[in-house]
């Protein structure tokens, strides 16, 4: 899974960090998650404890999008076999399927092919009726991969506002609040399109808190956000949004455009929602590897948020406390965390949240400690890598490291020191994973 693993695993401590990362990603692979969560016995489909009678439907289709959507569709085909009648999903990581059509889009900035692919999903949704069971597959990345501009907006408008929000360091819930009000699919609007079909939403969560309305911008679930909230996001992050976006949101605030559907709308009466996996899945798998290796595992948090370089400094402080005082656990220990840190982009370098996290931590991590920080989808921002593996010797020039961080160029600095972790697309996406191994010797 990890390129040049043997070269990176230069000590047992490094090897353990890599093993924890691999276990975390493997535990969230769609084929494994779907196999564990869905079963078919006769006409009964059991989804995470929820029972559905397949005999009550004339058609069963899959609709959705996200980085892992094609892998989930293929896994559903393996479980349902001939009971699955088709469908359409959009992804930037296609795999071969037999019954579900896989269309391509782009992430993190939406593209023209994504618009065409999202249109195919919307058209398939419009063909559903009361005798249709829709398995809505939504994974991380679905917001960008399912661009469906609302009336009066263009793809360029969506691209510009998305790039501006991401560069401003807005958290994903805030970004998606705006996206929902610029779309004809997001924010529960796909549920409108498929009504009165029965919808079972299957989620691979890449957001802290696992809020279904935030994951992939919640196409099939009630939307608690409003036009006024979207306007506030643009103001709070000082986003220079395209005029058409501002105008649409202002018209929504004025009541001239209908809000996205909330929990009181009847389109959700035949809907059920299941989070099949999330960041804790990876943490628990890594915890098992650490314990088996004789290290004390400590879960710091599964919902880490904040500026990546600042959160990393706290992790480095925890490592020093463990080494120097034996608190909160005695070494050898593995501290595990996950979530979604962000980066405020002020420079023009190459990097991503996990690369900035790793480089920031490496500046003060103690001897005897190793930190791995990765995005579980294998793509950390614009770094070209999944993340990085660092130790106390990674930073040999603090001035150069500081300049790299100031220019958002952490990946270049780490690449020069052979510290980047490369996996390629992993087939899943459940947010970030940080593994901090603190040994009791140097």
Image (cartoon, grey):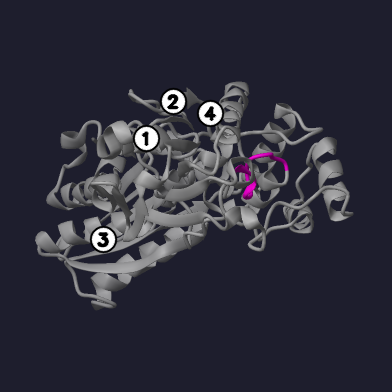
For marks 2 and 3, the one nearer the N-term is: 2
In percent of the image, x 77 and y 54: which residue is there? 227
For marks 3 and 4, the one nearer the N-term is: 4
Residue 23: x and y in percent read 22, 49
Residue 343: x and y in percent read 56, 49
For marks 4 and 1, the one nearer the N-term is: 1
Write the start and end of the magenta stretch as one range. Answer: 182-190
Q: Secondary structure at mark 3?
A: helix
Q: Report which residue position mark 1 lands on.
A: 73
- Label 1 crowding class (10 Å Cα cut-off): few <14, some 14-19, many 20+? many
Numbered label attached to residue 250: none
CA–CA distance in space, label 3 to label 4: 30 Å
Res 139 → quadrant: top left
CA–CA distance in space, label 2 to label 3: 31 Å
Q: Report which residue position mark 3 lands on.
A: 284
Q: Secondary structure at mark 1?
A: helix
Q: Report which residue position mark 2 lands on.
A: 102
Q: Are marks 4 and 1 in contact (CB under 8 Å)?
A: no
Q: Are marks 1 and 2 in contact (CB under 8 Å)?
A: yes
Res 22 → quadrant: top left
């Amino acid at each position: 899974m990890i390129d040049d693993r043997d070269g990176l695993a230069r000590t047992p401590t490094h090897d353990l960090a890599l093993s924890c990362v691999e276990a975390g990603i493997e535990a969230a692979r769609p084929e494994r998650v779907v196999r564990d969560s869905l079963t078919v016995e006769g006409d009964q489909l059991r989804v995470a404890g929820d029972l559905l009678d397949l005999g009550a439907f004339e058609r069963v289709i899959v609709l959705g999008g996200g980085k892992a959507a094609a892998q989930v569709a293929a896994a559903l085909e393996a479980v349902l076999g001939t009971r699955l009648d088709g469908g359409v999903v959009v992804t930037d990581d296609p795999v071969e399927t037999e019954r579900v059509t896989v269309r391509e889009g782009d992430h993190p900035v939406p593209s023209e092919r994504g618009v065409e692919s999202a249109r195919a999903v919307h058209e398939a949704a419009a063909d559903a009726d009361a005798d249709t069971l829709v398995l809505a597959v939504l994974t991380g990345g679905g917001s960008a991969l399912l661009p469906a501009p609302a009336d009066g907006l263009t793809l360029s408008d969506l691209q510009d506002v998305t790039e501006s929000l991401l560069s401003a360091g807005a958290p994903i819930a805030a970004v998606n609040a705006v996206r929902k009000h610029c779309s004809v699919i997001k924010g529960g609007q796909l549920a409108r399109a498929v009504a009165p079909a029965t919808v079972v939403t299957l989620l691979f969560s890449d957001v802290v808190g696992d809020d279904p309305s935030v994951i992939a911008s919640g196409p099939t679930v009630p939307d608690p956000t409003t036009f006024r909230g979207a306007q506030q996001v643009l103001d709070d992050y000082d986003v220079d949004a395209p005029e058409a976006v501002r105008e649409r949101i202002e018209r929504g605030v004025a009541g001239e455009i209908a809000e996205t559907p909330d929990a009181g709308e009847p389109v959700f009466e035949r809907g059920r929602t299941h989070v099949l996996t999330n960041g804790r899945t990876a943490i628990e798998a890594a915890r098992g590897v650490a314990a088996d290796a004789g290290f004390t595992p400590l879960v710091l948090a599964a919902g880490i948020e904040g500026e990546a370089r600042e959160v990393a400094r706290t992790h480095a402080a925890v490592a020093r406390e463990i080494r120097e005082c034996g608190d909160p656990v005695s070494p050898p220990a593995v501290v595990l965390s996950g979530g979604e840190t962000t980066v405020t982009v002020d420079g023009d370098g190459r990097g991503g949240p996990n690369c900035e996290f790793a480089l920031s931590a490496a500046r003060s991590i103690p001897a005897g400690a190793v930190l791995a920080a990765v995005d579980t989808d294998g793509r950390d921002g614009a770094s070209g890598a999944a993340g990085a593996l660092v130790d106390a010797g990674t930073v040999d020039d603090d001035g150069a490291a500081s300049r790299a961080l100031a220019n958002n160029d952490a990946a270049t600095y780490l690449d020069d020191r052979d510290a980047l972790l490369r996996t390629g697309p992993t087939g899943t996406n459940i947010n970030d994973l940080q593994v901090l191994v603190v040994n009791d010797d140097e």
